[in-house]
Image (spheres, grey):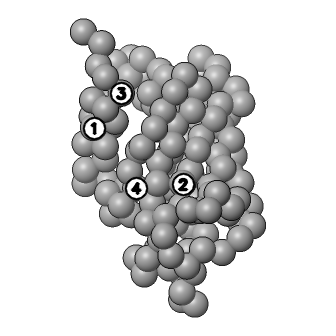
């Protein structure tokens, strides 16, 4: 039985319970053959002291969406995914609303994956550009 897109999104968001993704209110909202999109509210929970989105929260959003994208595209019965490197260039500040992270694959190898993650705001302004490398490792070792 093939799951609907809504069912897949519900299952993915359920897997985020009791994780950093739940703490930051990150919600997976869309996916396709080579991308995954999540959103996160911008509020005092993710502010730096001067009242704008913290770069660490942005990086956590980017790593979460990128790792989850890699997770979706591997055989999770046999492999687990771990992030091995992330870079983030922050371009614009955000004080309110939501930020959206779209992870797309630059490389989708059997062992390593490289993702480009663009973080935008409600007006589609580019907030941050991130790159994430992940690795798929066998569960049996």
Q: What residue do we see at 43% from left, 66% from top?
A: 41
**Residue 56 point in image, percent of width and height:** 56, 67
Of callouts 2 and 3, which one flags the residue occurring earlier in the amino acid sequence? 3
Do the CB atoms of the residues marked 2 and 4 lie less than 8 Å apart?
Answer: no
Q: Is residue 89 above or below residue 134?
A: below
Between the C-alphas of marks 2 and 1, the distance is: 18 Å
Residue at mark 1 to residue at mark 4: CA–CA distance: 13 Å
Q: Nearer the viewer, mark 4 or mark 3?
A: 3
Residue 29, image quadrant: top left
Label 3: element kind: helix
Left or right of 64, for residue 12: left
Residue at 59% over, 17% down: 110
Disc 2 designates what residue?
100
**Mark 2 crowd level (few <14, some 14–19, many ≥20, 10 Å Cα):** many
Cα distance in 3D space between marks 2 and 4:
9 Å
Q: Secondary structure at mark 2?
A: strand
Instruction: Give the camera-side residue of 125 and 72.
Output: 125
Instruction: Let me know if residue 82 appears in the view.
Output: no
Q: Which residue is mark 1?
A: 10
Q: CA distance from mark 4 to mark 3?
A: 18 Å
Q: Earlier in the sequence, mark 1 or mark 4?
A: 1
Disc 4: which residue: 26
Which residue does the numbered mark 3 point to in the structure image?
5
Q: Few, some or many C-alpha atoms within 10 Å of disc 1 (few <14, some 14-19, many ≥20)?
A: some
The x, y position of residue 6, in whole percent, is 31, 32
Residue at position x 47%, y 48% in the image: 38
């Amino acid at each position: 039985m093939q799951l609907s897109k809504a069912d897949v999104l519900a299952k993915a968001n359920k897997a985020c319970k009791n994780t950093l993704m739940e703490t930051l209110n990150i919600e997976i909202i869309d996916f396709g053959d080579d991308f995954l999109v999540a959103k996160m509210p911008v509020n005092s929970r993710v502010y730096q002291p001067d009242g704008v989105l913290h770069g660490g929260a942005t990086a956590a959003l980017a790593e979460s969406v990128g790792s989850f994208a890699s997770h979706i595209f591997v055989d999770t019965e046999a492999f687990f995914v771990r992030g091995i490197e992330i870079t983030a260039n922050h371009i614009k500040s955000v004080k309110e609303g939501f930020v959206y992270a779209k992870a797309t694959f630059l490389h989708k190898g059997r062992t390593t994956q490289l993702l480009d993650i663009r973080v935008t705001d409600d007006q589609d302004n580019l907030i941050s550009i991130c790159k994430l490398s992940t690795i798929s490792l066998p569960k049996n070792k």
